[in-house]
Amino acid sequence: MQTRRERITELLESTAFPMTAEEICERLDIKSRSIVYEDIDHVSKSVKRREKELLIRPASCGKCQFAFKPRKTSKAPSKCPKCRSQWILAPAFLIRQRK
């Protein structure tokens, strides 16, 4: 039986497109996005040892398309610093072989 983090890692390695925390929750039947965000922070450190990397499509504003800078944590920001909208498109994640 795989751990939750192993299942997240396997899912992000096998998918063709980046996945948000919400999509990961739905696929793996996990109740909380905050758990997924914590696990992704840990997974990003774990995959480095296996010559892989966690690619992150940063969060962006759904109203003005402002793209947030990559953050130290994987969580989505709460509102846009440019237009103050709370319509934030969540970051998405993917694991690929390091080049």
Image: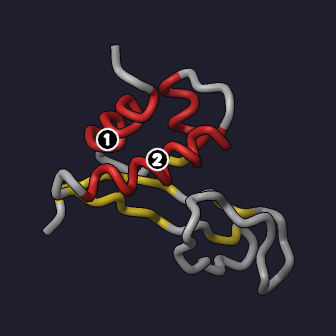
Residue depicted at 26% across the width and 58% down the height? 48
- Image quadrant assignment for residue 69: bottom right
> Is the C-beta separation of discs 1 and 2 under 8 Å?
yes
Callout 1 amino acid:
Thr
Q: Is residue 79 shown above or below 46?
A: below
Of 92 and 99, nearer the camera is: 99
Between marks 1 and 2, how big is the CA–CA gap? 8 Å
Left or right for 71, reference 42: right
- Image quadrant assignment for residue 49: bottom left
**Which disc is residue 54 wearing?**
none
Categorize mark 2 by other alpha carbons within 10 Å: few (<14), some (14-19), many (20+): some
Q: Label 1 belongs to which residue?
A: 15
Q: Is residue 58 shown above or below 39?
A: below
Q: Label 2 belongs to which residue?
A: 19
Left or right for 78, reference 52: right
Callout 2 amino acid:
Met
Q: Position of residue 39 (x, y in %)?
A: 51, 43
Q: Which quadrant of the figure contains the N terminus? A: top left
Q: Position of residue 74 (x, y in %)?
A: 56, 59
Q: Secondary structure at mark 2?
A: strand
Q: Residue lying furthest top in this view?
A: 1
Q: Which quadrant of the figure contains the C terminus? A: bottom left
Q: Position of residue 73 (x, y in %)?
A: 58, 63
Q: Is residue 42 shown above or below 63?
A: above
Left or right for 54, reference 32: left
Q: Secondary structure at mark 1?
A: loop
What is the number of callouts on the image? 2
Of 5 and 19, nearer the camera is: 5
